[in-house]
Amino acid sequence: MSNTPRSVFDRQLRLIAANELEALVSQYHDDALLLRGDRPIYGRDALREHFAALLASAPAIEVTSAVEAQDLLSYQATVTVGEEEPARQYGVLVLRGEQIDRHVTGAFPVLSGGGRKGGTITVDLEPYTAWTSRAVPDPRNAGREAIGPVLLEIVDAEGPILAERAYRLYVKASGGKALTSIARAPLSGATFRLTNAGAIEMEEGSEVLRPAGTPEVRVRELGPRALDEVPLREVAELMRRLRAAGATELPRAVLDAYGLVRMTAKAEDFLAQAQIVAEEA
């Protein structure tokens, strides 16, 4: 059976835990590139040196999220070395055949329960649980009996979730390229029926879906979401917690908390809206 990005990643974690240097290096192509946050590492000889140093530190790695698609896997994890504070890390693996061709990794700010580390204000975030994509029927002709259970599955996994994101996840899983108006109509209809049946709830005044009886807001890691896919009230609550921890430049503090760097015009507009909500609450 061919390796998948997830099977390679899982083996990577087992080999690190077992201190298996050569087996770990053999996961990579001879000309593989590992791009760290501070430098590039080319080829197996350099990789061997890198991983020898890593294994010597005996890291404890806890994966908080991992999402794969085709030959790619994106992950987030906390890494603890000795008595040091756990560090948040992210990474992307790219396979070529059954071995790793490219590996990008870097560090987020350290979680500290709201303290100040190196001038950065940080707060604890819940891990984000992403829906595990699978083949689903085309929403344009599937019928309500087929669409409803899948949509409920997505909301159960990722709620509170923007309806737009839930619909896009469904369409992508069905093999579609874009969320068209033709595909949106049956998905919106399924949402309406699930809401009427009491299976899910929709936040008043917005299209944020969550399983019935669950909290309206959960402050979580960014996970596989784009910034504008995070419910506005979730970002606003994160801002309130960051402000309570001592942050003053809230938009920048949010980007730091999510491990993002670039403040685009789109991000600035979105975070300005969230700050208004945070100030009004």
Image (cartoon, rainbow, N blue to C red):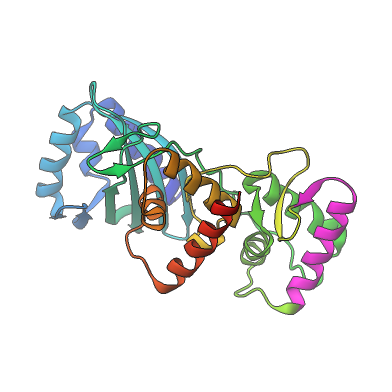
Residue drawn at the location 67% of the way across and 61% of the way down: 170
Q: Position of residue 41 (x, y in %)?
A: 14, 53
Task: Looking at the picture, tell me which residue is in the foreground, 14 or 207.
Answer: 207
Give the extent of the magenta segment: 182-202
Reply yes or no: does residue 192 show up in magenta. Answer: yes
Q: Position of residue 27 (x, y in %)?
A: 27, 46
The quadrant in which residue 95 appears is bottom left
Does the rendering let one see residue 231? no
- Single out the residue that lies furthest toward the top: 83
Q: Position of residue 210 (x, y in %)?
A: 71, 47
The quadrant in which residue 48 appears is top left
Reply yes or no: does residue 50 show up in magenta. Answer: no
Marks counted in the figure total 0
Task: Looking at the picture, tell me which residue is in the foreground, 176 or 254.
Answer: 254
Direction from residue 191 to residue 92 in the image, left or right: left
Residue drawn at the location 10% of the way across and 41% of the way down: 49
Does the rendering let one see residue 153? yes
Task: Looking at the picture, tell me which residue is in the foreground, 277 or 75.
Answer: 277
Direction from residue 276 to residue 259 in the image, left or right: left
Above or below residue 151? Residue 111 is above
Q: Please, what is the dominant secondary structure of the magenta stretch?
A: helix
Direction from residue 229 to residue 187 in the image, left or right: right
Residue drawn at the location 23% of the way across and 44% of the way down: 26
Task: Looking at the picture, tell me which residue is in the foreground, 27 or 247.
Answer: 247
Residue drawn at the location 62% of the way across and 48% of the way down: 158
Q: Position of residue 129 (x, y in %)?
A: 56, 43
- Single out the residue that lies furthest toward the front: 280
The quadrant in which residue 217 appears is top right
